[in-house]
Amino acid sequence: AQSVTQLGSHVSVSEGALVLLRCNYSSSVPPYLFWYVQYPNQGLQLLLKYTSAATLVKGINGFEAEFKKSETSFHLTKPSAHMSDAAEYFCAVSELKAGTALIFGKGTTLSVSS
Amino acid sequence: DGGITQSPKYLFRKEGQNVTLSCEQNLNHDAMYWYRQDPGQGLRLIYYSQIVNDFQKGDIAEGYSVSREKKESFPLTVTSAQKNPTAFYLCASSITGGTHEQYFGPGTRLTVT
């Protein structure tokens, strides 16, 4: 079975600093990969997805992620953090069969200080 | 506007009572899912359904039940057999082809005392 590991349950950055949230997956074949964001007491919103096209994926709000097959990683980055980026971020991987559930990491809470 | 609605946003129940959480979608998606979220544990799959009148257990189905009588609706019942029902519950949907991305509702926070 596939799994997702998010390194660091909590990441703190200063406003304007680089954001790097780490995600590693276990899969013998390239899966579909996703990053979602969750604000307090809300549902999850899709930030970006990797679907075997370009390895560098751009998403909403200035975030991007790079798929590295050799490292089985899909880290999320943003060049300059904004206060509004403070939220919980989830990395997820899809089983190969469509219509089955996503497998989520445990999440990383991003704090942004002024 | 297309989307997923969950109601109510907050729900309070006494221990020993069954409670049903509503999930409705107008995205014309075939597949629907229920996840449970607890602090520090990510999202865990309770049940999912790929088609009307069919559903499968997820990783933590014990103490929960679902039905899928209509494509648009996938209600979740938290029964008295669920030992620790207090949590945030998220419903999602997706098409059965494509890139597997799921769309989420706003969630229901259930508190059982």
Image (spheres, rainbow, N blue to C red):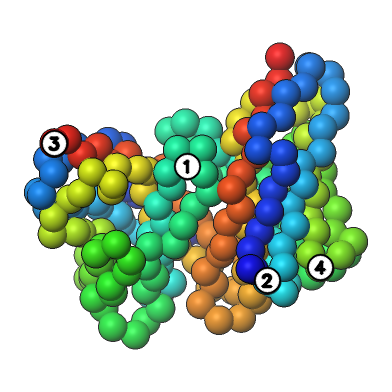
Q: CA distance from mark 1 to mark 2?
A: 25 Å
**Three-letter amino acid code at the position of disc 3:** Ser
Q: Please state the horizontal and vertical placement of residue A85, each as a whole percent of the image.
A: 28, 48
Amino acid at the residue labelled 1? Gly
- Camera-side residue: B19 or A40? A40
Residue occupied by mark 2: B27
* Marks 4 and 1, the one that precedes in the sequence: 1
Residue at 24% of width from left, 64% of height from top? Answer: A62
Could you tell which of marks 4 and 2 lies nearer the N-terminus?
Answer: 2
Is residue B84 something one can see in this rendering?
no
Q: Are marks 4 and 2 on the same chain?
A: yes
x 69%, y 48%: residue: B6
Disc 1 is placed on an element classified as loop
Q: CA distance from mark 4 to mark 1?
A: 27 Å
Residue that carries the numbered disc 3 in the rendered image: A114
For marks 1 and 3, give the CA distance. Answer: 28 Å
Q: Which residue is mark 4?
A: B71
Q: Nearer the viewer, mark 4 or mark 2?
A: 2
Circle 1 residue: B42
Q: Nearer the viewer, residue B108 or A101?
A: B108
Whole-number angstrom distance, CA of label 4 to CA of label 2: 10 Å
Residue ID at (26%, 78%): A55
